[in-house]
Image (cartoon, helix red, strand yellow):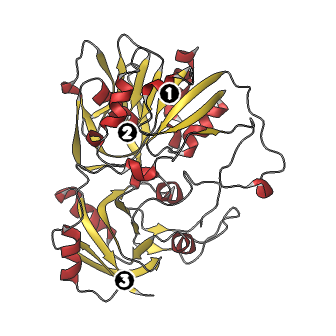
Amino acid sequence: MRPAILALEDGTVFRGSAFGANVDAAGEIVFNTSMTGYQEIITDPSYKGQMVTMTYPLIGNYGVNPEDVESSRPHLEALVIRELSRVASNYRATESLDAYLARHGVPGIQGIDTRMLTRHLREKGALRACLSSAEASADTLVDKARAVPSMEGSDFVKAVTCASPYEWDPDDTLSIPWQDASRRQSSPRSLPPVAFRVVAIDCGIKWNILRILRQLGCKVTVVPAGTKAADILAYKPDGLFLANGPGDPATLPYVFNEVRAMIGRLPIFGICLGHQMLGLAFGGRTFKLKFGHHGANQPVMNLVTRRVEITSQNHGFAVEYDSLDKGEVELTHLNLNDRTSEGLRHRKHPIFCVQYHPEAAPGPHDPFYLFNQFVDLMK
C-alpha cells in the first residue's frame, strides 16, 4: 500500500497507509464513535468540509451497497481508520469500501493509532488537518493544515443543497434514488396515500428523512437553501421541514431569516442544522462545540416525558438556550454528556426541533415519535 501522512495544525503527525482515492485532502478533523454505519456517515452531507476518524478499529467489513446511502455521493473530505477490512462479507455488498471511496475521489488513511488521535481531539478540540500520500514533508503538510479555513464562519450549505426544487417519490412507490428505471425493484413496497404536503428546505438533507416522511403519508417537495418564504408558502404546504447540513449556522441568514418569516404560518419541524436555524430564527445565538457530537450513542433526556433516549448525532455547533426568550421558547431535550440544548419547541406556535437525528435509528428507535408528532401537528 501507498504510505500516507496525516498532519494536524498543531504539528501532530500520523503515518499510515493510503486507501481510496490517490488525492490529497484537507479539512477539520473530528471523531465518530459509531460501531457500524460507516456508509451512512460517509454519505451524510453534514460532513462536508470535515475528515472523519472512526473510533471503532475495523471498518469496511460489510462492504458497501447502493441502498444504504444517505445522498448521491460521499461528502466527507477523508476517512481516517485503524484498520481497513481486507474482506467485504455481506450478501448485500456490491463493492468494497476501498473501491467505493476511490470511485468517488475520496482518500483515506489506515494503520494509525485512532485511540491516540481521538484522545488528542478530545483534549485539544477539533483541529484542521491535511492528508497526503504524495512525497511531501510533514512540515509542509502541517503548514497546509494551518491554511485550511476554520469551520467557524464557513458556509458549506451552498456546496450540498439541491440546484432546483424536486418532488420526492412522485409515483407513490418506495423510491430508491440511486436506481434508474432499468434497476428499479420489480415489486416496490406500497406506501400509504398522500395525506399531507410538506416542503423541505435542503441544507444537506439525508434521504432517510424523506423516506420516513413519505411512509407517514407526506408528499415532500425539496427546495434549495435560500428559497424565499413567499415561494415556499406558494406551494400551500401543510408543514415545513428544516433539514440537517454542514458548516456554521451563523453564516446562513439567507435561510433562518426566511424561516423567521414563516413562524406562525404553518407547522415547522427541524432536525440538526434545522434546529439551529430555528434557534437563530427565534432570536437566539449558536456557538461552536469543542469537538462536537458525532456518534450513534449520545444520551438525551426528554424533559417532557423524563425518559432518556439513545440518539445518533452529527454536529459541531449548538444553540445557546440562555440567549432565547424563555417566555416564547421551551427547552424540551437536554444532552446528558455536556448539558447542551438538544430540543426546543415554541410555546405559542406549532414549531419544534431537535439537535439529534431521529431518522438514523441507532439500534433502538427511541426518537421516531418525533415524525408522528409532526404529522399530528399538520392534522
Structural crowding at the residue carrying mark 3, measured as other residues with C-alpha within 10 Å and reported as few (<14), some (14–19) or many (≥20): many
| Residue depicted at 55% across the width and 52% down the height | 71
Q: Amino acid at mark 3?
A: Ser
Label 2 sits on residue? 273
- Between disc 3 and disc 1, the foreground one is 1
Label 3 sits on residue? 133
Residue 300, position in %: x, y? 36, 34
Query: With 74 as the anchor, is 6 left or right in this view?
Result: left
Q: Amino acid at mark 2?
A: Leu
Question: Mark 3 or 2 closer to N-term?
Answer: 3
| Residue depicted at 42% across the width and 62% down the height | 56
Q: Secondary structure at mark 3?
A: loop
Question: Mark 1 or 2 closer to N-term?
Answer: 1
Quarter-of-image position of residue 281: top left
Q: Amino acid at mark 1?
A: Ile
Label 1 sits on residue? 232
Query: With 254 as the anchor, is 291 left or right in this view?
Result: left
Whether residue 65 is visible: yes
Determine the CA span between mark 1 and mark 2. 19 Å
Q: Secondary structure at mark 2?
A: helix
Task: Check whether the beta carbons of the residues at disc 3 and disc 1 lie within 8 A of each other.
Answer: no
